Amino acid sequence: MQLGRIIGKVWASVKNPGLTGQRLLIVQPVKADLAPGGKCLICTDSTGAGAGELIYWVRGKEASFPFTPDEVASDATVVGIVDELNLGKRSLGER
Amino acid sequence: MQLGRIIGKVWASVKNPGLTGQRLLIVQPVKADLAPGGKCLICTDSTGAGAGELIYWVRGKEASFPFTPDEVASDATVVGIVDELNLGKRSLGER
Amino acid sequence: MQLGRIIGKVWASVKNPGLTGQRLLIVQPVKADLAPGGKCLICTDSTGAGAGELIYWVRGKEASFPFTPDEVASDATVVGIVDELNLGKRSLGER
Amino acid sequence: MQLGRIIGKVWASVKNPGLTGQRLLIVQPVKADLAPGGKCLICTDSTGAGAGELIYWVRGKEASFPFTPDEVASDATVVGIVDELNLGKRSLGER
Amino acid sequence: MQLGRIIGKVWASVKNPGLTGQRLLIVQPVKADLAPGGKCLICTDSTGAGAGELIYWVRGKEASFPFTPDEVASDATVVGIVDELNLGKRSLGER
């Protein structure tokens, strides 16, 4: 999984039926120090995460597990909202 | 999923039977500010998207979901056409 | 899928039985303007493509679809030979 | 698989049910000389590895194999703790 | 598949049961001219390859095919030992 922050949403009226009813979040990947790093991507959501929240997402085939038995044509899904990162002495609370 | 813009098409008469009848679009990945970023790729299409449109595509095993039960030998498929991106204050309409 | 050009072959007498009888092509990825870009890789072939031809390949689980029901241990397979790329005004014929 | 070192943990109270009860480790990828290289990622764990240990992880669909028959929505899992790396003459013990 | 050279081994006493009895090789990816390029990785082996040999490996779900019906939690497996690369005029023998 990778860390990221939700920075926006996508609206799409024409889309694959397997994505109907799914929220599409724009996620900015972040590094362990929470600085942005890497290209934004679009994720489906299984957590109810909102704008600005620190989350982690899963990619690949596993991105469709949270929606089983539906076959959601997604390759990236938000699966958790981060409360706190513990990096040795440093502890970064988010909530 | 990732954002991209359709910039062309590919014609191929010799191809795997699993790709017969599939449109093959050339997609330029774009960043959240819609500037081009990254290498072009070839996608199959499940939306009817045309040249110049802003789309998002799915990669990997999920790229064959829209064609189930056919086994289409594709690893990247356009699954939605973007109406609007919402990035906090900025809202980028496409339609 | 991604565009590439076939630049060579690999001979291997010791290999996984699932690859027996498969041609192994060395593919140089190319960009939309057909200039080389990125690292070479080894692909199995489902098209009969030869040295110097412009092709596109599929990677991941889908790379074994053309060989179903055989379980070929390949993660990259040539699935089409390009006749022509259409990029707006420019049209790049290959055949 | 890739080599990495465990540098921290993630706490998340809101998460996909498929991740309930899983430890989430922050892993810093390392190179063959054990110097850090590449972006940190979050891994589930099948070994009991602790902070500071040198491990290797598996990614993709295989990352959920250790939890079969549970469908854990993970794309990266620690599957081994390294005792020793042997690189020709050099041997790097970890334990 | 990608080309690489075997540069070492990994010993791990604590590991996922799905990896028990598997040799773990450290592979340095090489380019078509056989110069090293890219990050080392750890591969399981289905060929009996030894230190210094030029090999190619498969990654992803296919990496577990050679071990079917065992579910080996590996995402990278050596599937062939290269005898010779043919790049147009140049022919690079390895054996």
Image: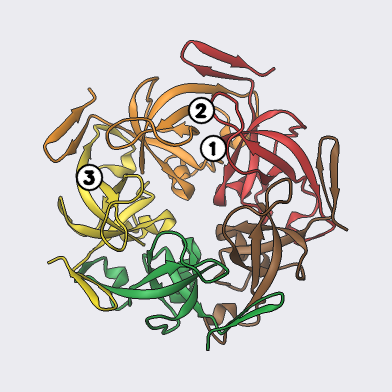
Chain colours: A orange, B red, C brown, D yellow, E green
Residue C14 x, y percent position in the rendering = 52, 86
For the point 74% across and 42% down, the residue is B25
Residue where numbered disc 1 is placed: B1
For the point 35% across and 49% down, the residue is D72
Q: Chain of mark 2?
A: A
From the viewer's perspective, tell me whether residue E74 is left or right of residue B77.
Answer: left
Q: CA distance from mark 2 to mark 1?
A: 9 Å
Question: Mark 3 falls on what kind of element?
Answer: loop
Where residue A4 sits, quadrant-wise, is top left
Query: Count the marks: how many?
Result: 3
> Which is more foreground, mark 3 or mark 1?
1
Residue where numbered disc 3 is placed: D21
Q: Chain of mark 3?
A: D
From the viewer's perspective, tell me whether residue C32 is left or right of residue E80.
Answer: right
Label 1 crowd bin: few (<14), some (14–19), many (20+), radius 10 Å: many
Residue where numbered disc 2 is placed: A24
Observer-nearest of B22 and D54: D54
